[in-house]
Image (spheres, grey):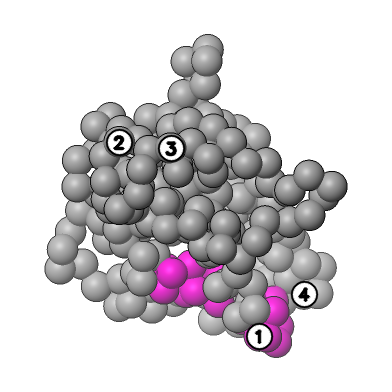
Amino acid sequence: MRSENEPGGQPRSFIEEARRRQIIAAAVEVISEIGYGNASLARIAKQAGISKGVISYHFDGKDDLMRQLVIQLYVSGAEYMTPLITAVEGWRGKVLTYIESNLDFVDANKRYVAAMTDVVLNLRDTEGKSVFATVEGADEVLGPLADLLREGQREGDFGDFDPVLMAKSIRDVIDGTAGRAITEPDFDVRVYAAHVCRIFDLALTKQGEQ
């Protein structure tokens, strides 16, 4: 397997990075069609139009490829959401943009989200424990959102609530919406996003300011 960097600390070339993304995209298509359990490296290689050896050159087996598939989606989501959140003035706007941009990203990447969900539910380590569905993993996702909520409270923009519990509530709605987007063909994510934002806008606001 190629390491994250070339010998001497040099980063991967553009071509190598493009190849890795091509393999991950092929894995997404295969998982979407036949599920995580049936997604062999041979089948993924066939989907990508490459040899199995090319996958082994870039990834340390199926488990490593599956890990990178999940990580890549989170990275892509952050790359999409962060500039939008940063550009908004005020903590209320930032939190609502967090929700809206997250759901927009889900809406635009349903097949990838479905494949990632399949991997997260099924990928296990050598001890049989879930690789991604862990408390530590959840905290990494919740932390930045809880921080936004705390800052809004410090600035007086939000009412009195537990920021961690509110962050969990927001994430539960986002993850639940992703599930509906995957399983319900006619589910309108954008309409639902507007509905959800109205609800949380009321929940975040100080009493008497509605």
State the mark number for residue 150.
none
Over which residues does the magenta segment extend?
A: 86-105
Which residue is rendered at x = 24% and y = 32% of the image? 38
Residue topped by disc 4: 156
Q: Main secondary structure of the magenta part?
A: helix
Identity of the residue drawn at 38% across and 30% down:
122
Closer to the camera: disc 1 or disc 3?
3
Under mark 4, the amino acid is Gly
Q: Nearer the viewer, mark 4 or mark 1?
A: 1
Rounded to the nearest angstrom, the CA distance separating label 2 from label 4 is 56 Å
Q: Is residue 145 above or below residue 210?
A: above
Which mark sits nearer the N-terminus, 1 or 3?
3
Type of the residue with mark 1: Val
Labels 2, 4: front one: 2
Tell me the residue that label 1 is attached to.
88
Q: Residues within 10 Å of mark 3 (few under 14, many from 20)?
A: few
Quadrant of the image occupied by residue 154: bottom right
- Residue 2 locus on image (x, y percent): 62, 41
Q: Which residue is mark 2?
A: 42
Quadrant that contains the C terminus: bottom right
Q: Is residue 99 magenta?
A: yes
Q: Residue at x 77, y 75 (%)?
A: 156
Q: Earlier in the sequence, mark 2 or mark 4?
A: 2
**C-alpha separation, residue under disc 2 versus residue under disc 1:** 46 Å
